[in-house]
Image (tube, rainbow, N blue to C red):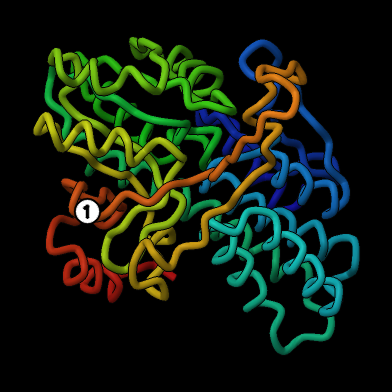
Amino acid sequence: MSKLEQFVRNLKDQQLLLSIWFENGALKLINQLKLPHKEEILTIQKVEDLAEAIRNMTIRGSGAIGIAGAWGMYLAALHSGGTREEMIRAARLLKSTRPTAVNLMKTIDEIMDCVNGFEMTPIDRIEAKVIEILERQLQFEHLLGSHGANLINDGDTVLTHCHSGALAGSGYGGRALSVIRKAYEQGKNIQVIACETRPYLQGARITAYELQKFGIPVTLITDNMSGYCMSVGRVQKVVVGSDRVAANGDLANKIGTYMHALAAKEHDIPFYTATSSHTIDFSIQSGADIEVEFRGAEEVTSLNGQRLAPKGVEAIYPSFDITPNSYLSGIITEKGVITHPFSQNLQQLNSKVVQ
């Protein structure tokens, strides 16, 4: 058994919800489009198939697709013998799938750093880097979860949007759900309100599914109910994930996040994003510089292949929106909770970032 296969086996012994792993010479991944009604495991043997799975959101979540990028590069190395040309081709293909999520870009670049200087990169070199990335991401989830849990009080109800959990990360709790899971494991009596998150319904299908598995009480609402819930005192904290954080603290997250931040600000409710230092993009000065991915209109006009709107009706689907840093109470990272002024404090974090 290789070191990588042994590592994966050890992960499975840690009560983790893995979204993607390596087994019997191929990648295995949970088809997140089928949850919660069917736990379908797909077998991926080609980088092209993995790229399509990332693009069509069979696997999604900033942490998970970052990890998928590492696995994809390992798969490319395995099938090409580590040939530089094929590694470059795989990197370009995987990077093209989801342009807003910076974790995917950074992870692939990290693998490519192992390739530089080699016409044929030794497989064990890439294997060691994949293990390093997976270990680090899992450690990040536990650390940022512990820092964030200190912000959650006994009796709090926490609202979260989209899915930033175990299947969107390394298997423990991803980003936002790492905070919630740690608080619950500390014995705090907490509840969660999960927004359904149209049009893919990640909150309804996956966040609620995970929280139920963790035994954490969860109530589902439609996205447009958050303001009401805040106005009547049903929400004490808001914790969301992130797909990219600019150097000034502006946040790119699933479309609808900005709307919840506005409501939280109006009602003096602390609003946090839970993220790893890898998600902070110091090359992007503000949210205005973040490329927002637009997906097909049919994802809004239809649901599970069933058309919702009349034929001929136009629709748009910006997959993310930008929440200005002024609406954030803090950015929860594995290094601690970063607060205002974000431009200054994030730069201090930058000197401590694990690369």
Q: Give the residue displayed 67% in from the left and 37% down from the top.
A: 297
Left/right of residue 352 with respect to residue 60 in the rendered view: left
Q: Amino acid at mark 1?
A: Gly
Q: Is residue 166 above or below residue 140?
A: above
Q: Give the residue displayed 48% in from the left and 26% down from the top.
A: 197
Q: Is residue 152 above or below residue 220?
A: below
Q: Secondary structure at mark 1?
A: strand
Left/right of residue 342 with respect to residue 207 in the rendered view: left
Left/right of residue 238 with respect to residue 92 in the rendered view: left
Query: Foreground residue, 327 or 63?
Result: 327
Residue 183 seen by the camera: yes
Q: Is residue 109 above or below residue 255?
A: below
Q: How many marks?
A: 1
Instruction: List x then y, in percent, for residue 205.
Output: 56, 18
Q: Give the residue displayed 74% in from the left and 62% down from the top.
A: 73
Query: Foreground residue, 167 or 122?
Result: 167
Query: Foreground residue, 276 or 80?
Result: 276
The residue positioned farthest toward the left in the image shown: 268
Query: Foreground residue, 322 or 28?
Result: 322
Q: Give the residue displayed 19% in from the left and 29% down from the top.
A: 237
**10 Å crowding of disc 1: few (<14), some (14-19), many (20+):** some
**Dot 1 corresponds to which residue?**
336
Residue 139 seen by the camera: no
Instruction: List x then y, in percent, for residue 249.
Output: 27, 60
Q: Quadrant of the C terminus?
A: bottom left
Q: Is residue 34 above or below residue 260?
A: above
Left/right of residue 309 with respect to residue 219 in the rendered view: right
**Image quadrant where residue 29 sits:** top right
